[in-house]
Each structure stands twice: as structure tokens, then as C-alpha cells.
Image: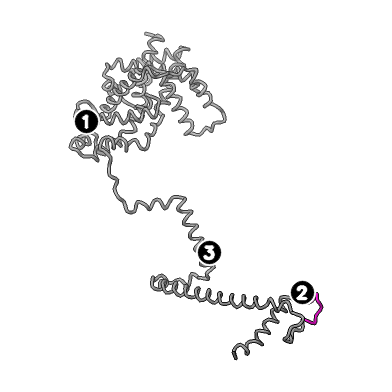
Amino acid sequence: MEPDAQLVQRCLRGEGPAWEELVRRHTRRVYNLCYRFTGNSFEAEDLSQEVFLRIYRTLASYRTAFGGFPTWLTSVTRNLLVDHYRRTRHDRVTDSLEDVMPKVEEKHSPVRTPDKAALASELSAQVQSALSRLSPDLREAVILRDLQGLEYNEIQEVLSVPEGTVKSRINRGRIELARVLQEMGLRPG
Amino acid sequence: MTWTCVQIEERLSDYVDGLLSASEQREFRAHVDSCRQCAPLLAQVTLVVGRLRTLEMEAAPAALVSKILDQTLGPRKTRRNWLGWLPMLWQPRFAMGTVTVLATLLIIFQAAGIRRSDITAASLNPVNIFHAADRHVHLAFARSVKFVNDLRVVYEIQSRLQPAGNPAPNNAEPSPVPSQQKSPNESQRGHSANGTFAFATAILADAPTRSSR
């Protein structure tokens, strides 16, 4: 598989197929980051398009010295998500845990078929619901670390904060998420 | 040195991610194993992190890549593929349609008495197909002409039957029909047959006269 850096160089020479390959390679990752952060598939789709549009326009400013292309892409996505969050903060009506709980309990109904796909989908919805309870700082740290699988130094680059802050946010985010999911019924054993 | 609960909570992720040194790990475990608050917290965080890592990425909407490419590279021309219609044939509705057409053709061939052995490579020649079709059209036309002519004769017979069916008492021509001597009931029952016979006899009797005229 051709490295991202080479594809970027080809893109800068005006090769459309190289850009198409970059888009195909990273769309799912960007979409998931947006989806996990916003919790809304339509918003995530719009934001993903916005991310790639921004990447396309600023591709010439990408330098390998910044780190890998995925890290740069994640960084652009994260900045856009923060902008989006600030823009829509006042419109957002955060649902209380009491509103979420009945939905989760309904999903625990014994009549549900306990097949793997259904369980995975249920867990995904639970996690999404719990993530929305976290503050944006903690949420993005947990998403980047545990859902996107980034290393600490990559998260540090993406968030542009010191390593200690990254560690602290991930730790607090995990503990907070664990408590929320425990209240929702996810317990060990 | 024994760790406190606050320290445990602060280094929880380091432990989960394996970032503690061997001595730190021992102290961490020593506290957690004897603490009723930290043990369940560690278990819960470990569970959640484990579950998060098993979660598969959500699939991006199918049209997302196309939308992005359209927005960045502009609307792309779709390549013309002459065989692009072939996959459509695998759709159930086309399969059902094909089966229906084949069944209809089979029924038509059965009804027309066409056997599979009759169909050869020569019969698929357009010239032969044209000749066969032409022959069948002419045959059909000849049959219909004959049918119309037959109908004319039948109508003529029927129109002449009317007077023969109601025999006048003072019929001038002596009728050789024996049915007239039968009982009224019998006469009524055999009305049609006797009438036809009478008329046919009359036609035959009349024929030499007409031809002589």
C-alpha cells in the first residue's frame, strides 16, 4: 500500500486518483471521530465532508515534520469539532441521565435476541450515550485514545497540550465514563 | 510506601495501559487488593476500556466518499460501460420475467405442436423464418376465407330452413319427408334434424333445375 506521504505528494501534483485513494482510506476514521464526538450521524456526515474540504484546501501546508498524515488529519478534524461544538453549544439540549436510563433499560429487556451483532450495537449505543455525558475535553481524549487507538504522543500533537494534561484527561475521562456506564447497568461479571 | 486511594485513582490509566514500573505495579496491586473502593473502580475501568477497544468502527454512509470527491474534485464523469446492464439481469424481477417468458413460449410451442427436434439451425435462418411465417399467414387467410364461405352456406341453409320447418298444409310440391306422418310430439322433438334433412333434399331436388336455368 502506497504511504500517505507519497499520496499527498501526488495530490499536490494534481493527481485526482491519489486524492481519491486518500479519501477512501481515511473517510471511515474521520466519520467515526465525528460520530463519536457529536453522537449524530447526519452531523457526522456533514462534518466529515467539511474536514476533507479543509484538508483539500490546505494540503500544501502539510509537512511530514508535523507527524503522520493520520495525526494531521485527526488534528484538523478535532479543531473542526471544537469549532462546531462552540458554534452549536447554545442550541444543544443535553438530555439528562434520567432520560437516557429508560432507553438503556428497555434494551436490557429479556425478549431481545442475544446475538453478537445486537449486543455490539447495544454496547455502541450505550457508549455513545455515556460519552455525551462527558465534558468535551475528556470526551475527545477518551475517543482518541480508546476508540481511535492513538498513542499518547499523537494525542499530545492533536490536542496541542502537554503530555501530563493528556494523561490526566484520559484518566479522568475513563473514570467518568466507567461511572456513567455503571449507572446504566454495565458492570463487571 | 503505601499508595492512597487518590494516588490510585490518578495512576489508574497508567496501570491499565501498562505504563507503571514493576515496583509501582506491585504497590498499586497491593493497595487495590486490600481496598474495597479501589478494587471495584479498577474492575469497572478495565471493563470499560476493554469494551471500548472491542467496539468496531461505525460504517461511514455509502455515499460519503462520492460526496467528498464531488465537492473537492468536482462532479466526475461516469465511465460508459456497455456491459454495465448485465448485473441487472441478476435481479429477482428480471429472473422472474425471464422464467415467465420461457414458460409462455413453452406453452405456445406445445399448443402449436412444435417439437424441440423440429427446431434446427436452418430454422433459425431469417429467410426460412420469413417463408414459414408467410406460409402460415397464407394458410390462415385461406382457412378464414373458407370459414366465411362455409358460414354463408350455413346462413343460406338456415334462411331456407325457415319455410321448410313450418310446412304449409297446402304445400304444392309433394314432400317425400316421412316425418310429416309422424305424431306431433315426435315431429316437434326431431324438428331440427328433420327440417335440415328436408331442406337438403329440397336443395338437391332444386339443383338440376337451377343449373338448367
Q: Which residue matches tag 1? A: A59
Left or right: B163, with A83 as reference point: right
Q: Quadrant of residue B74?
A: top left
Q: CA distance from mark 3 to mark 2?
A: 44 Å
Find residue A29 and report its horizontal and vertical position in percent. 33, 31
Q: Is residue B184 magenta?
A: yes
Nearer-N-terminus badge (3/2): 3
Say which element carries label 3.
helix
Q: CA distance from mark 2 to mark 1?
A: 106 Å
Q: How many other residues sit within 10 Å of disc 1, few (<14), some (14-19) or many (≥20)?
A: some
Q: Which residue matches tag 3? A: B107
Name which residue lies at 46% across and 57% down: B98
Q: How many other residues sit within 10 Å of disc 3, few (<14), some (14-19) or many (≥20)?
A: few
User: In front: B16, or B93?
Assistant: B93
Left or right: B104, with B30 as reference point: right
> What secondary structure is the stretch in magenta mostly built from?
helix
The amino acid on which the numbered mark 3 sits, given as a three-letter code, is Ile
Work out whether disc 2 and disc 1 sit on a shared chain. no
Residue stretch rendered in magenta on the structure: B180-188
The amino acid on which the numbered mark 2 sits, given as a three-letter code, is Arg
Task: Output the chain of dot 2.
Answer: B
**Vertical order, B112 against A23 (above or below):** below
Q: Which residue matches tag 2? A: B189
Find residue A176 and report its horizontal and vertical position in percent. 41, 16
Q: Farthest residue in the bottom direction?
A: B212
- Residue B14 visible at all: no
